[in-house]
Image (cartoon, rainbow, N blue to C red):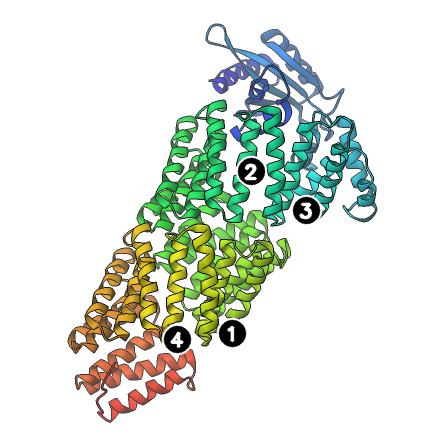
Amino acid sequence: PAQSELKYFLDQMIQEVKGLEKENIIGPTLKPRDRAFEKAKSEYSHRIPGPPESWLYDVVRAGVICKSYKQMSDVNKWLGKNCHIVQAKNRFAEPAFHGYRDLLFHVSIPFQNELAHICEIQVHHKDILALNDQFGLPKHYEFFRSCFLSPSRPEEEALNDLALMSKYGKIEGTLMKKLLKSKDPEQLRLVAGLCRDKLDEFTRALELYRRALHLQENSSDPDDEKVAATYLGIGQVLGSMGETDESLENLEKALAIQESCLGSNNVEVADLYAEIGHMLTKKGDYSGALVQLQRALAIQETQLGNDHFLVIKSLQDIGLALQEKGDFKESENEYRRALKIQEEVLGDVHPDVAATHALIGTSLCLHGEFAKAMEEHRLALSIRETELGKNHSAAAESHTDIGVLLCQKGEYEFSEWRHRKALRIREAIRGKDHEECAISHCHLGEVLSRRGDFEGAVGELKRAQEIREANVGMDSPVTAGSYIDLGNIYCRHGKFSEALAEYRRAKVIRESILGPTHPDTAWAYMCVGNALNLEGDHEGALAEHRKAVAVFESVLGRSHPKTATGYQSIADALLASGNRDEALIEHRKALAIRANVLAKDHPDTATSCSRIGDLLSGKGDMVGALVAYRQALAITVGLCGEDHPDSATAHVNVGRVLAAQGDLDEAIDEIQQALALRESTLGEDHVDTGRAYQMLGTLHSMVGEFEEAQEYHSKAVASLAKELGKKHPEVKVAMKKLTMAENEEEEEEL
C-alpha cells in the first residue's frame, strides 16, 4: 500500500512542478527485508523506544531527478506545502561521507483515516547524479558503508582512519606497526572489520582484533557489549581461517557476555547462537549445530514474529544441517516451512522464494527424488529469469543445479549444455577468474569424464584448480575439493598413480585446516583408500577406509549415507584381497542404510545391489546374484530410463549371470540391449561399447554362430585399439578372440 500511495503522491508532484516529467522519477521501491533488518540492527539498535525497525524511514523510497537548482528548489517548496516533512537533510551543506550531495526528505504520506506511511524521497541534481554513476560512488558507498555505522565512532574519525590506510596503501609493514601501537579499540576494530569483510586479510584482522581486545579488557571501565563484539569478530576471522575449535571458544565467550548483559531471549543472543551453529556445521558437528540453530529460531520467533526474515533464514540453516546429517525428509520439511512464510510475505515469484525452491530441489536430488527435484529447480530458474533476468548470477546457479541433476540422470549432453550456459553467464558478469566460474569448470569436468572425454575433463578441472589457487590459495579446503575432483577423473580413466597424488594433496590440506575428525577429511581418507586399492595396495586401502568410517560413524552416525559409502569402500578392499565373506557383510550393511535412508530408486541403492551381485556371482551363487542384478537393473531403468549408460551396465551384469547359468539366448538379448544403449549414448568407438561388442562375439561363438562372432569381435578390436592402443592387454585378448572366431574355434565362457 505504501508504494502505491507514494506513487500517487509523486504523480501529483509531476503535474504541479514545472518541467518535471515521469522519466525524472525513480521508483518507488521497497528496501529488501534483509537490508532493512541489517540497517535497523547496525544503526538503530541503541535507540529508545524499540524495536530498531520502527526507526526505519526508507522502507519505501523514491528519487526525483531535477534538471536545475531552481527545479530542486521548486520540489522542496512543493513538498513543504503538500505533506508533513518528518525529517530533512541538506547534503549540499553537509555532504555524506562519500561526498555525494542531494536533498533527503522523510515525509508522512496519509493512508486510511489517521494512519500514515513514512517514506523517503531523495532529490538529485542530474549532473551530480551523472558524476556519481561515472565515478562509481554507489560501489564506494557499499564498500565503506560499514565503517560509518558504529555509534561510538564519529564519522570524522572514521574518515581519518580511512585516510591513514590510503596514505600507506597496503595493510602491512609501517601501517600495521602503527596500528598495533594504537590505543583506540574502535579504530582497531574498524580496520580489522575491513580486513576481514572486504580484503580477506584474515591474519592481519586477527592481530588487530586481539590488540583491541587487550585494550578493552585492560580498560578501567570496559564496555562488556563491545568486548563481546570483539570476541565475535575474532571468532568469525578464525572461522574463515579454518580454525573452528578456537573460533567456537571465542564465539562462546561472546555469547556468555551477551547473555549476561542482554538476557537469554535477546535477538542479538540469537544471532550468536546462529553463528555458533554455522561454525559447528562447518566443523561437521551437525547434531550440535542443530541444537544451536533451534535455540536461535525459538528466540527469533518469540521476539520478531513467525514471519520475520531471520526466522526464514534460521529454518533454511536448520534444513541445511539436517541435509548434511542425512535427514533428507526433515530437511525438506524445514525448507518448506521457510517457503510457506516467504510466499505469504513476498508472494510466490520473489527471488528469495526461488532460492528456497532451489534448496528443496537440492535436498530432493540428494535423496534420489530426481523428478520432484527437477520441478523445484525449473521453478527456481523460471522465477529468477523473470524477476532478475536471464543473465543474472542466480539464473546461472539454477542452470548449474539443473546440470547436476541431469548428470545424475545420465543425460550428459543436456547437462553439459546447462553447465556451459552457467559458465557463459558467470564469465560475462564476474570475469573468467571468479570462483563461481571454477564451480562451472568442475561440473563440466565431471560431465565430460562421464562422456568419455578424458582430456577435456582434465582440462576443465585444471582450469578450476588455477582459479581457486589464485583466489584462495593452494592450502584452502575449497582448493582441496578441486584436487579430489581431479583425482576422481584420473581414477575413472585408470590413472591410479595420478589420482593418488591428487587425493593425498587434498588429504594433507584437510587434515591441517579441518582436522582429522572432520567428515570432509574422512572423505579424503576414503578417496586415498580407493586409489590404493586400485593400485593393488589392499592393506593400505583398508587402513584408510577404516579411518574414514570411524569418523563417519562418530560424527554422522551409523545410518548416514556417507557411512554407507565407507562400508562399501571397505567391502571393495576386502574383496580385492580375497575376503569375499567379510566383503559381503560390509556391502549388506551399506545396502541396509541406503534402503532405509534414501529413496527406493536411489542410484546408490542400485550400486549396493550390483556390488552384492558381483560378490554372489564370484562365490558361485548365480541365483542370488541374478536377483541382486535384476534389482539393480529395475532401479536404474526406473531412475534413468532404458537409454542410459548405467542401464546398459545393469543389462551387462544380468547377461553375464544368465550366460554362467547356461541361458545363452537370454544372455544375448541382455547384452544386445546393452550394446544398443552404448552405441547410441557413448558412440561406437567408446571402450565400453567395444567391450559389449566383445561379449556378444563370445556369446555367439559359444552357440556356434561364428560368422556373427567374427563380426562383433572385429568391431571390438577396432573400438578398443582406437581408445587403448594396439599394445594394450585388453586389445591383445580381443585380437585372440577374433582369430578364434575366424578359425571357428568355440569359446567356452564369457
Q: Which mark is residue 497?
A: 1
Q: Nearer the viewer, mark 3 or mark 2?
A: 2
Q: Nearer the viewer, residue 190 or 670?
A: 190
Element marked by disc 2 = helix
Residue tagged by mark 4?
Answer: 577
Element marked by disc 4 = loop
Structural distance between the alpha carbons of marks 1 and 4: 19 Å
Structural distance between the alpha carbons of marks 2 and 1: 41 Å
Contact flag, marks 2 and 1 (Cβ < 8 Å): no
Q: Residue at x 61, y 27 (%)?
A: 260
Q: Amino acid at mark 1?
A: Ser
Q: Residue at x 26, y 73 (%)?
A: 617
Q: Residue at x 48, y 51 (%)?
A: 422
**Residue 686 in sight in this render:** no
Residue tagged by mark 2?
Answer: 275
Q: Nearer the viewer, residue 58 or 188?
A: 188
Q: Residue at x 59, y 42 (%)?
A: 248
Element marked by disc 1 = helix
- The location of residue 160, given as percent across then percent down, is 80, 33
Q: Is residue 624 above or below residue 727?
A: above
Structural distance between the alpha carbons of marks 1 and 3: 36 Å
Residue tagged by mark 3?
Answer: 202
First-in-chain label (1 vs 4): 1
Q: Say which quarter of the image contains residue 176.
A: top right
- The location of residue 718, given as percent across then percent down, is 35, 82
